[in-house]
Amino acid sequence: MRFLIIDAHAHLGAWSKEEFFPVATADWLASYLDLMGFDKLIASSLLAIFYDFHEGNLAVVEATRRYKGRILGYVTVTTSRFLDEAIKEVEEMVTKYRMVGVKIYSTPLYHPVPMPWPEVYYLHIDEPWMYRIVEKAAELEVPVLAHATPEDCLNVAKAVPDATIIMAHMGNTQIARGDWNKAIMVAESCKNIILDTCSSTVDMGFVERAVERLGAERIVFGSDVPLFDPWCQLEKVKSAEIDEEDKRLILGENIARILRLEE
């Protein structure tokens, strides 16, 4: 059986000037889809996360135009400090340029690893100003991919119950202290939270546990390419001891449903 495979968590651009990670151009991402046999991916801009959100978002728009139907885009918001401008950016990128979701990257002050930017640039999704940006995403009926802790995702999901919050990495991040069990428990208590599978850790049984507690319908596949090895991320799902139908949902059909790609 061939599955529809949609990578719900990919990036366009470069992580840094170092050569530790590949530079994910639009052509590179298209080649990645061919290599992996994937159908589509949804990309956010690394430039938008760390430097200029408008310039980075426009680069994603160009990639979606170049590979229409294969590369889809998240509009990235770097900080709520640009509140009205950020809300306008989300609305324009979704309505005019057909972005399919919003990416918010949290870098809380308690991040265990020193980060290379001043404190003023730290972003936290769980703050009242950010709720208005999440509300705009809900109004536009697009999901929010939140790089955030389970606790923060829970607070935002409760504050904006009409929003669909995709918790990036299922708690398997440094800022979330790798606590995927907490991520699952949080999602159990809040039905508008979806979990994504990509992470730099490969704990045994976490996909099976999430399916057992939430059902496969609440989980989506992501690779975090070019930052993580996509083969490893894919095998987390393909090798999981779950039904083939569950794998089919996780690998592509869930995110297709959330984004209404079948319509």
Image (spheres, rainbow, N blue to C red):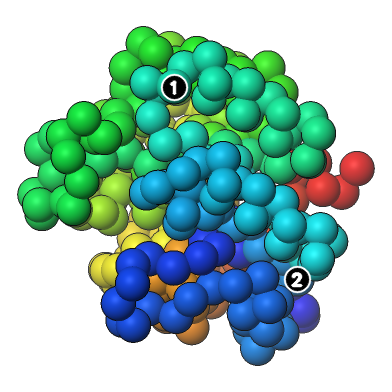
Residue found 29% across the figure and 29% down from its top: 124
- Tell me the quarter of the picture where residue 155 sits: top left
Figure check: 111 above or below 26:
above
Give the residue at mark 2: 39
Q: Secondary structure at mark 1?
A: helix
Residue 168 placed where, x, y %?
Answer: 42, 48
Characterize the local packing of mark 1: few (<14), some (14-19) or many (20 or more) Cα atoms within 10 angstroms: few
The alpha-carbon separation of the residues under discs 1 and 2 comes to 35 Å
- Residue 242 versus residue 92: which sits nearer the camera? 92
169 vs 139: above or below:
below
Question: Which of labels 1 and 2 is toward the front?
Answer: 1
Q: Quadrant of the N terminus?
A: bottom right
Secondary structure of the residue carrying tag 2 is loop
Q: Is residue 244 above or below residue 254?
A: below
Instruction: Please tell me which residue is depicted at 39% across the width and 73% down the height of the picture.
Output: 228
Please give the count of numbered marks on the rendered protein. Answer: 2
Mark 2, other Cα within 10 Å: few <14 / some 14–19 / many ≥20 = some
Residue 152 percent across, percent down from the top left: 30, 28
Give the left or right position of residue 148, taking residue 56 as reference: left
Residue type highlighted by circle 2:
Asp
Q: Quadrant of the C terminus?
A: top right
Identify the mark at residue 82; answer none if there is no mark: 1
Q: Position of residue 262 (x, y in %)?
A: 87, 49
**Farthest residue toward the right?**
263
124 relative to 163 in the view: left or right: left
Horizontal placement of 19 versus 55: left or right? Answer: left
Q: Quadrant of residue 92?
A: top right
Task: Indicate which disc, 1 or 2, sits on the residue closer to the N terminus.
Answer: 2
Residue in view at x 80 percent, y 65 percent: 66
Q: Residue at x 33, y 67 (%)?
A: 16
